[in-house]
């Protein structure tokens, strides 16, 4: 272990942790906005109850996403200062735009939404949640454009005097083909989480308290969430398929490592499950689908898929001696777990819809249990997806341009980075426990009883309590 | 005007906005155990900043992002060099942000007390550490010729920087007290107003001492004029607070913070991080900057979006302009 390893662990831990909250913020902000819109359109109180109920869960989660997000922006400068120097000209721009265009929108309008229930006219209050949701989703685009530059650098040149990357075409950076496909894939993944949460909470109430007066509200939430889950699962698969083909073009090593494909094959078969020695060099058992890998990677069942050994030889010739191969068991398994967990969530969503066919109310205890683990599945899928994407790019921090080990801060000591890694890990662990307990507490409490809403135009009664106050 | 100068100004403006806005958030947080004598009073205090604190904090994210985009060398050297203070600031902001949202999510007194601690320390630490950081930026730090920080943590804790930390801490405390007096009704308002004057006098002494010391380190005519204006604004604000003209008092402390930050940035220019070792290590607005192309794009983005942001953030303050008191706090 040296400072580089600890800095990498810190980035991994803080980023995966941050991204446990982000998908829920992205997806749930829109779903809550839709629920509030339904209430606005129909006047049906069940939608208002659901808006307030899921809105509360959304806010408990939102706070965690906000505070862990600040760490992300600071971390590049603190632990990865040589990386920041190298790419600042390009990478800093989407980050700054993200803050100016998206974070201000999100944070300001969330404040208005939380505290504005009785201060703003209904229509304007509805607009605030949409503005916040749009801000959240916009922020995803800019940060993914920044990440896509690391995956597939475009729109730049290396200044021979300074050795730094300089922006030459900002439109190219924003329309990077990796960004264009990663954005819908990530957003769909986020809705997979949000839809699953809707289902899990609603199902719990439906099965535990079938005679509750709020059953119609939960029935709607379970159905709505299941459809969101199924539609986003389909979108995840379609975008993931396209992304795989693009990744095969820009980082063939990552996709070869996803398969543990050592030698170039044409046609190549897809490994559903391969048990091999730990370093992946020897195969003990394999279940394979012929032609599938060729088709997934190239769109042609007989297409040639490059293997790790050939790519390693090619990169050595291109970039000089060194290992250009990521850690195969991590890429292989994270790729499979991502797909497996995502599919499992979609399967449960199908079961939930089936259980409610023709007006039935689900009763199965097994379905209840499945429903409870349901939100964890796409969360895990999202995490493994990012672990795959980032670990699969190694040893590069900017593919083909800068090695991860060259990006770390030279002036930061092992003691410093270890202090910060330990501090973040401890505070994050404590907050995770607190957050989960709160989420469960509020999920169990169920939809709120509605108190008659005061007239927002009647601002004279100075003594009435505030809605949704801290 | 050179693009690098425009961006130096923009970064300065963003930090100025951040300190004026989150300054009173920090002040409210630090005053939570002082002015909030029971749970409902503490809730009044937190709710004065409830709708706006998150938006205020984004000024920091934008300042950091602007620094990264416009002056990558500055961002990289500063953030890796000021490692432990920034780590403490981050931990404080995490605890504090979560505390606002979670404090009232359970009824137990022990639960609330714990989050109250998080709000207090989470406000106190950054309020002081930002002063320490900016004093060190003005004073200069040991930088090697390739712009790497060569000092340690204790280099940053010199007497001048500690005075800077005390000054920002005191300024934000006064600013927060004035803000509470402006935003509340009843007993809490009276106590906040009285406290603002008492703390304000000590703050004025600290601020004058710190600005004078700063100007002996590096100064130009404009910086001296700004420092004098900052002192006048602070004294004017305090006089207004004493006269219970709370709106004017708030304008006074806000202007004092803005002018004090402007003093530091003006004295610093054209440097952005001076080196106390090798003059070649000094980072300037020119040698730390991004390419003109990046700066040009970012200028367009800033020109278009900054007015929009200012408009809707201003509107938020308008929506929540009413004073609040214990009567507005729901029972549960």
Image: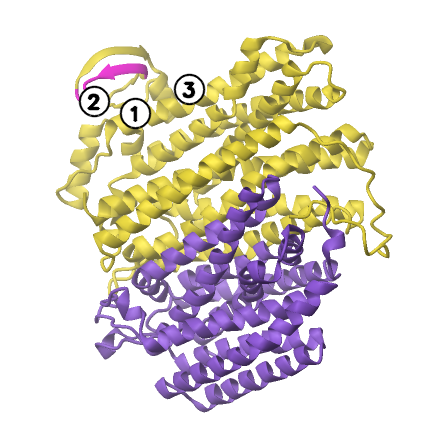
Chain colours: A yellow, B purple
Q: What range is drawn magenta here? A: A271-281
Q: Residue at x 50, y 20 (%)?
A: A373
Taking depth in this image into account, of A161 and A227 the one nearest to the observer is A227
- Which residue has dot 3 on it? A340
Please report, as a chain letter, where disc 3 is located. A
Q: Is residue A90 left or right of residue A158?
A: right
Q: Residue at x 25, y 60 (%)?
A: A163
For the N terminus of chain A, which image quadrant? top left
Residue B48 image point, x, y percent: 66, 58
Q: Is residue A136 left or right of residue A34?
A: left
CA gap between label 3 and label 1 equals: 12 Å
Please report, as a chain letter, where disc 1 is located. A
10 Å crowding of disc 2: few (<14), some (14-19), many (20+): some
Residue A332 is marked as 1
The reply to whether the C-beta atoms of the residues labelled 2 and 1 are less than 8 Å apart is: yes
Residue A385 is marked as none
Marks 2/3 same chain: yes
- Relative to B272, say whether A113 is above or below: above
- Which residue has dot 2 on it? A280
Q: Is residue A112 left or right of residue A74?
A: right
């Amino acid at each position: 272990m040296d400072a580089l390893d600890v800095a990498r662990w810190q980035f991994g831990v803080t980023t995966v942790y941050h991204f446990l909250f982000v998908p829920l913020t992205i997806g749930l902000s829109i779903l809550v906005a839709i629920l509030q819109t339904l209430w606005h359109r129909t006047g049906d109180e069940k939608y208002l109850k659901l808006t307030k109920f899921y809105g509360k869960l959304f806010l408990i989660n939102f706070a965690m996403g906000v505070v862990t997000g600040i760490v992300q922006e600071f971390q590049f400068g603190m632990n990865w200062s040589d990386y920041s120097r190298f790419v600042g000209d390009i990478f800093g721009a989407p980050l700054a735009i993200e803050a100016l265009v998206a974070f201000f929108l999100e944070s300001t309008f969330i404040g208005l939404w939380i505290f504005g229930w009785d201060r703003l006219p209904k229509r304007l209050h509805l607009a605030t949640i949409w503005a916040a949701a749009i801000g959240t989703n916009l922020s995803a685009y800019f940060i993914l454009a920044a990440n896509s530059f690391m995956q597939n650098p475009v729109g730049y040149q290396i200044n021979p005097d300074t050795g730094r990357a300089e922006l030459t075409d900002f439109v190219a950076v924003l329309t990077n083909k990796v960004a264009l496909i990663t954005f819908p894939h990530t957003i769909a993944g986020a809705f997979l989480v949000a839809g699953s949460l809707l289902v899990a909470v609603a199902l719990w109430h439906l099965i535990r308290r079938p005679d509750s007066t709020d059953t119609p509200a939960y029935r709607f939430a379970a159905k709505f969430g299941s459809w969101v889950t199924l539609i986003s699962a389909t979108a995840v698969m379609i975008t993931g398929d396209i992304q795989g083909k693009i990744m095969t073009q820009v980082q063939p090593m990552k996709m070869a490592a996803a398969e543990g494909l050592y030698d170039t094959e044409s046609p190549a078969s897809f490994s559903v499950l391969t048990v091999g020695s730990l370093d992946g060099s020897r195969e003990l058992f394999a279940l394979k689908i012929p032609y599938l890998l060729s088709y997934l990677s190239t769109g042609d069942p007989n297409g040639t898929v490059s293997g790790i050994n050939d790519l390693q030889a090619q990169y050595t010739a291109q970039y000089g001696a060194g290992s250009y191969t990521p850690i195969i068991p991590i890429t292989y398994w994270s790729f499979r777990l991502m797909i497996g967990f995502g599919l499992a969530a979609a399967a449960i969503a199908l079961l939930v819809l089936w259980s409610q066919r023709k007006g039935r109310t689900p009763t199965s205890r097994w379905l209840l249990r499945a429903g409870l683990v349901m939100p964890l599945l796409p969360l895990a899928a999202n995490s493994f997806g990012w672990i795959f994407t980032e670990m699969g790019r190694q040893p590069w921090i900017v593919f083909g341009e800068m090695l991860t080990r060259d990006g770390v801060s030279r002036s930061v000591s092992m003691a410093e980075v270890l202090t910060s890694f330990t501090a973040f890990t401890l505070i994050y662990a404590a907050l995770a426990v607190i957050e989960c307990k709160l989420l469960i507490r509020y999920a169990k409490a169920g939809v709120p009883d509605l108190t008659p809403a005061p007239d927002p135009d009647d601002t004279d009664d100075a003594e009435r309590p505030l809605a949704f106050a801290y | 005007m050179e693009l690098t100068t425009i961006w130096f100004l923009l970064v300065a403006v963003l930090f100025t906005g951040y300190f004026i806005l989150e300054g009173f958030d920090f002040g409210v947080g630090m005053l939570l155990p002082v002015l909030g004598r029971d749970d409902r009073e503490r809730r009044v205090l937190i709710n004065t900043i409830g709708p706006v604190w998150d938006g205020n904090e984004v000024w920091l994210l934008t300042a950091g992002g602007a620094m990264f985009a416009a002056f990558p060398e500055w961002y990289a050297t500063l953030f890796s060099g000021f490692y432990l203070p920034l780590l403490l600031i981050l931990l404080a902001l995490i605890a504090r942000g979560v505390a606002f949202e979670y404090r009232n999510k359970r009824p137990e007194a022990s639960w609330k007390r714990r989050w109250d601690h998080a709000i207090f320390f989470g406000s106190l630490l950054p309020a002081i550490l930002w002063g320490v950081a900016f004093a060190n930026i003005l004073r200069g730090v040991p930088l090697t010729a390739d712009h790497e920080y060569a000092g340690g943590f204790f280099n940053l804790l010199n007497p001048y920087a500690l005075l800077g930390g005390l000054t920002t801490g005191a300024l934000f405390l006064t600013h927060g007290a004035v803000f509470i007096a402006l935003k509340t009704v009843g007993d809490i308002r009276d106590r906040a107003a009285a406290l603002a004057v008492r703390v304000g006098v000590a703050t004025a002494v600290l601020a004058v001492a710190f600005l004078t010391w700063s100007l002996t380190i590096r100064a130009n005519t404009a910086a001296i004029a700004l420092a004098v204006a900052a002192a006048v604004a602070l004294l004017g604000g305090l006089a207004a607070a004493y006269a219970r003209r709370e709106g004017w008092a708030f304008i006074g402390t806000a202007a004092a913070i803005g002018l004090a930050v402007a003093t530091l940035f003006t004295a610093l220019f054209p440097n952005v991080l001076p080196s106390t070792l090798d003059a070649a290590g000094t980072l300037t607005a020119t040698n730390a900057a991004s390419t003109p192309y990046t700066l040009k794009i970012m200028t367009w983005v800033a020109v278009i979006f900054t007015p929009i942001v200012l408009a809707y953030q201003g509107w938020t303050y308008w929506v929540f302009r009413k004073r609040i008191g214990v009567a507005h706090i729901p029972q549960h």
